[in-house]
């Protein structure tokens, strides 16, 4: 993620506010439920318990859920911008990692109409931003299951630290679902934490004339009765915050690069110019980064430029970053492209296990910007370091990158001393 | 959590590693990390382990100062 200059100003003073709801430094993920032997019974009885309402991230205790591992999401979503109304069906293919009597998904707002698990109607209840699903029979540890959730409503955004509103935003001509660290739960039920990656198949139906862009490989579009369905497939495991859908009026550019599709979209709010030229250099930047970091990790390339003033940043949404138009106001800008593309290796393909390690994403992506600048005849990486070393604020030196929001945890380094 | 430190000091940490281990080991680390962890999840501890394994150097003090310290570390030097 990269903030625009304007966005950077917004977050001054919020630099160490990350420890939202911090409950402890060493919290473990939910433990497997024990299989209790029943005395007098020939076979031990299994004890089915509710899955945890959080995946165990000390920085964000309510993010994600415990007791299962998602392999694939299949989303079918219809959005009517005129009414700001979303209707969706999400199919979650998962494997139980404990004997589950019920399990949670994260879902903010929206109304759940029906839930099935393995084809049978299942109970469902809402507790804040948690959807609690109780299947007709318990789910056995190690077994796969398929949950299908139908829902609708007027999507609402979430307040994100630093970034302002995150998640599904209704725009002038469509919508943008984007945000870090959370966004996905505003438009589909999800295990919303990067430690549970999954593949995605996304179908978005919008009024004819609008584009609906998401992650991965474009699978074509079909129109019927005034509505167009855009199909997308992300076949590499993806962290949920890297999912996106952007709906609106865009100039589209498609191509093929190394046998992979390139699909880019720039809002027609902008006259054709610096944003288009910058995004067009995506494959050139990706090829340079590939020479330094090894093979490009995904099946597609691209970029999306949006003009909604609530988006003051760029985010490395998988295979197709989304950029604020603000980055291109002063002309061509491939630094931000290099940053977001570097995340395809560092942050996306290699994803965080816990949010505290966010420097692994941002430090390496920043360094990639320095390498790209040097490669293109600008300042050297050494010079970038020297400037940062000489001029960084006291706040930077007081804030440990590997414990940015949790000073009380920063002393306890958990690395092994293996050398 | 998304403050300047994880970006700017994070980038400087990567450069400090480069100075400490030399270009050959450094660029091998940059290629090996995404190859070994492709499509997976990873932690800071695993990155430090990989850097130590590839460089053959003890990097605890470097990473302690750059990632966990609360004051400006000394100028990085080759180890």
Image (spheres, coloured by chain):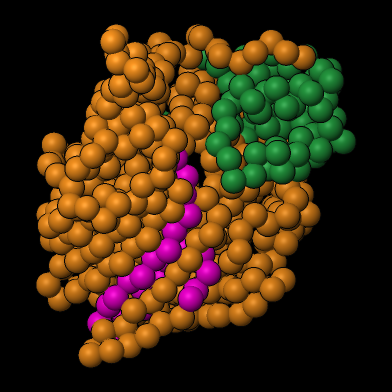
Chain colours: A orange, B green
Identify the residue at image location x=53%, y=74%: A263
In the foreground, A384 or A232: A232
Residue A82 locus on image (x, y percent): 15, 76
Say which quarter of the image contains residue A41. Answer: top left
Query: Eyeballing the image, is B26 above or below A270?
Result: above
Residue A261 locus on image (x, y percent): 60, 74
Query: Eyeballing the image, is A257 above or below B35?
Result: below
Residue A200 lies within the magenta run: yes
User: Is A47 positioned to the left or the right of A375 in the image?
Assistant: left
Q: Main secondary structure of the magenta part?
A: strand
In the foreground, A348 or A89: A89
Residue A39 locus on image (x, y percent): 29, 9
> In this view, which residue lies farthest toward the bottom?
A225
Please say whether residue A258 is visible from this viewpoint.
Answer: yes
Highlighted range, magenta: A196-219
Residue A405 locus on image (x, y percent): 40, 24
Identify the residue at image location x=19%, y=66%: A87
Please say whether residue A378 is visible from this viewpoint.
Answer: no
Residue A90 lies within the magenta run: no
The quarter of the rendered structure image containing the C terminus of chain A is top right
Identify the residue at image location x=43%, y=53%: A72
In the foreground, A163 or A182: A182
């Amino acid at each position: 993620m990269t903030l625009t200059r304007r966005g950077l100003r917004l977050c001054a003073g919020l630099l160490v506010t990350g420890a939202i709801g911090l409950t402890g430094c060493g919290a473990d993920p939910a433990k497997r439920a024990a299989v209790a032997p029943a005395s007098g019974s020939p076979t031990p009885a299994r004890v089915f318990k509710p899955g945890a309402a959080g995946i165990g991230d000390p920085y964000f205790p309510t993010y994600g859920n415990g007791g299962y591992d998602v392999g694939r999401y299949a989303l079918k979503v219809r959005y009517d911008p005129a009414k700001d109304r979303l209707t969706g069906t999400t199919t979650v293919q998962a494997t139980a990692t404990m004997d589950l009597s019920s399990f949670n998904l994260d879902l903010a707002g929206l109304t759940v109409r029906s839930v099935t698990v393995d084809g049978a109607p299942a109970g469902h209840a809402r507790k804040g931003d948690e959807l609690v699903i109780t299947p007709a029979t318990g789910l056995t540890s190690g077994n796969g299951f398929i949950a299908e959730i139908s829902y609708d409503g007027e999507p609402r955004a979430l307040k994100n630290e630093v970034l302002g509103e995150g998640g599904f935003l209704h725009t002038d001509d469509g919508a943008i679902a984007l945000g870090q660290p959370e966004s996905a739960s505003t438009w589909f039920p999800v295990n919303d934490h990067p430690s549970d990656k999954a593949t995605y198949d996304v179908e978005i139906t919008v009024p004819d004339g609008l584009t609906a862009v998401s992650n991965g490989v474009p699978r074509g579009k079909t129109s019927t009765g005034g509505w167009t369905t855009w199909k997308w497939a992300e076949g590499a495991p993806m962290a949920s915050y890297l999912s996106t859908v952007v709906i609106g009026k865009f100039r589209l550019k498609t191509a093929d690069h190394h046998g992979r599709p390139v699909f880019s979209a720039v809002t027609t709010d902008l006259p054709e110019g610096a944003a288009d030229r910058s995004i067009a250099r995506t494959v050139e930047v990706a090829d340079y980064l590939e020479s330094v970091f090894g093979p490009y990790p995904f099946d597609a390339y691209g970029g999306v430029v949006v003009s909604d003033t609530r988006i003051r940043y760029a985010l490395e949404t998988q295979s197709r970053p989304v950029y604020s138009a603000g980055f291109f106001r002063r002309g061509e800008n491939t630094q931000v492209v290099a940053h977001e593309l570097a995340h395809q290796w560092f942050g996306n393909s290699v994803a965080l296990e816990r949010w505290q390690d966010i420097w692994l994403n941002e430090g390496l992506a920043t360094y990639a910007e320095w390498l790209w600048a040097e490669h293109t005849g600008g300042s050297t990486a050494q010079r970038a370091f020297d400037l940062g070393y000489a001029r960084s604020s006291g706040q930077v030196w007081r804030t440990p990158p590997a414990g940015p929001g949790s000073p009380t945890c920063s002393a306890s380094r958990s690395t092994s001393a293996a050398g | 959590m998304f403050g300047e430190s994880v970006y700017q000091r994070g980038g400087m940490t990567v450069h400090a590693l480069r100075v400490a281990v030399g270009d050959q080991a450094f660029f091998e680390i940059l290629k090996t990390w995404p190859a070994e962890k492709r499509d997976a999840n990873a932690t800071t501890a695993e990155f430090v382990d990989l850097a130590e394994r590839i460089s053959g150097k003890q990097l605890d003090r470097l990473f302690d100062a750059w990632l966990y310290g609360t004051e400006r570390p000394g100028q990085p030097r080759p180890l």
